[in-house]
Image: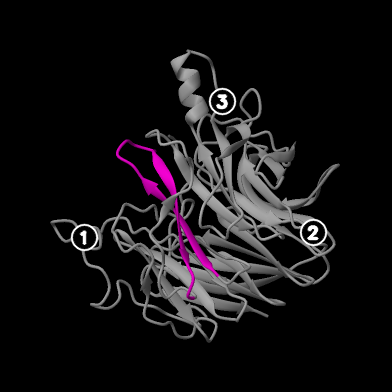
Amino acid sequence: MTHLRTLGAAVALAIVLSSLPEPASAAEPKDKATMAGMTAMGKKLRVELGSSAAFARDGQLLAVAKQGDHLLLYRSGDQGANWSPPAIVNARPEAISGDGENRPKIAFTQDGGVLVSWTKPLGKPNTGEVRLARSDDGGASFTPPITVHRDRQEITHRFETMVVGGDGRIYLVWIDKRDLESAKATKKPYRGAAIYAAVSDDGGRSFKPEVKVADHSCECCRIATAVDTDGAPLILWRHVFEPNERDHALAKLKTDGTPASVERATFDRWKVDGCPHHGPALAVAPDGTRHAVWFNQKGGEGRAFYGRLTAGGIVGQRFVGGEQAARADIAIAGHRIGILWKEFDGERTQLHAEISEDGGASFKRLALGAASGASDHPRAITSGKDLFAYWRTELEGMRVFRLP
């Protein structure tokens, strides 16, 4: 699989509201994978920093991150200034994907449960299973994880994402290659992979058999989710439109996970024989407007974009940041829209934000911080009417920025 663009990564001075050293205390799990950051020669290997954070209904900030063969859940009661000792999500160690496009996720159920999902890599390259664990005590302990899908082939079930619908149902959506494998067996052509979904109506304790959302997705870009104003889940992903245009598709899901609609969302007409490993982000305003950020090539130039997705096409499409801008995310809190992105300046990775107070018609730009080591993709998160940036960096750990 071809990954077309990587950026320099991150860590140094910034407006830091929290800092968590990594790896942490002696009480945390120790195994070979925990020490995988060092080679036999003592040189550091690539660090997997993919993590997620979200505010619970009680105002607590929870973050989940990989350490070795475990996922650790951290809690902060002061918006990231301080973090509690971590709880172990998976008591039994297992392989875990921890890169920015395929990171662990966190969500909250209507009955007070905490859910953590992740992709478990399997033995063959680019294969995996979608896993989920639930906590009934606010994240202090977790039930043994389950594999969400019934299909157990050693193939791609990866790049999972999770969303809680307005009715409380839990939707897990991922990239799946079972249809590609079937096509290969019968020597039929098949573009890309497929999008599958599984639904839980008992708070994530169990899932109904998975269903197909769409054929011909791109193979390794993260999937964006949001909840529409009627409570239905929306998913946005990079699609392989015929014959080979890697734009984005948008689907609204029914309560069984099948699509009520699937439509083309972007029209940059990027023809490329490989996955850019660079997924979109989506947020829905109270008036129903769908705001998105994505990375594409248009007119021969690869850039990050923002736009409002409508039935008649994209409104207000424009560049986000400069030529090196990437890994954009978006969130909406009340009437405020926040966009985050990273941008490498040749020496360090800069973290930037834009805030709109008028529904996306105009934005003001903010410089949040910089980093000179490795860093994760930034996450735009919300608490009530407040917007925050969550950024995990190699040297300074988990960092939280409140957007004014």
Residue appearing at x 52%, y 74% in the figure: 369
Q: Position of residue 361 (x, y in %)?
A: 83, 62
Instruction: For residue 280, say whether it is visible.
Output: no
- Residue behind mark 2: 229
> Dot 3 lies on which element?
loop
The foreground one among 186 and 263 is 186
Q: Position of residue 77 (x, y in %)?
A: 52, 85
Q: Is residue 231 above or below residue 367?
A: above
Instruction: For residue 384, say whether it is visible.
Output: yes
- Give the position of the N terminus as an image quadrant: top left
In the rendered image, residue 131 lying in the magenta stretch gets the answer yes
> Dot 1 lies on which element?
loop
Mark 2, Cα crowd under 10 Å, few <14 / some 14-19 / many 20+, is: some
Query: Of the residues shown, which amino acid type is indicated by label 3?
Result: Arg
Circle 3/circle 1 CB separation < 8 Å = no
Q: Which numbered disc covers residue 38? A: 1
Distance in Å between CA atoms under marks 1 and 2:
47 Å
Observer-side mark, 3 or 1, equals 3
The foreground one among 292 and 140 is 140
Give the prevailing secondary structure in the magenta stretch. Answer: strand
Q: Position of residue 243 (x, y in %)?
A: 64, 22
Distance in Å between CA atoms under marks 3 and 1:
39 Å
- Residue behind mark 3: 191
Mark 3, Cα crowd under 10 Å, few <14 / some 14-19 / many 20+, is: some
Q: Earlier in the sequence, mark 1 or mark 2?
A: 1
Q: Is residue 19 above or below residue 93?
A: below
The foreground one among 145 and 289 is 145
Q: Which numbered disc covers residue 256? A: none
Q: Earlier in the sequence, mark 2 or mark 3?
A: 3
Residue appearing at x 54%, y 60% in the figure: 343
Q: Which residues are magenta?
A: 113-137
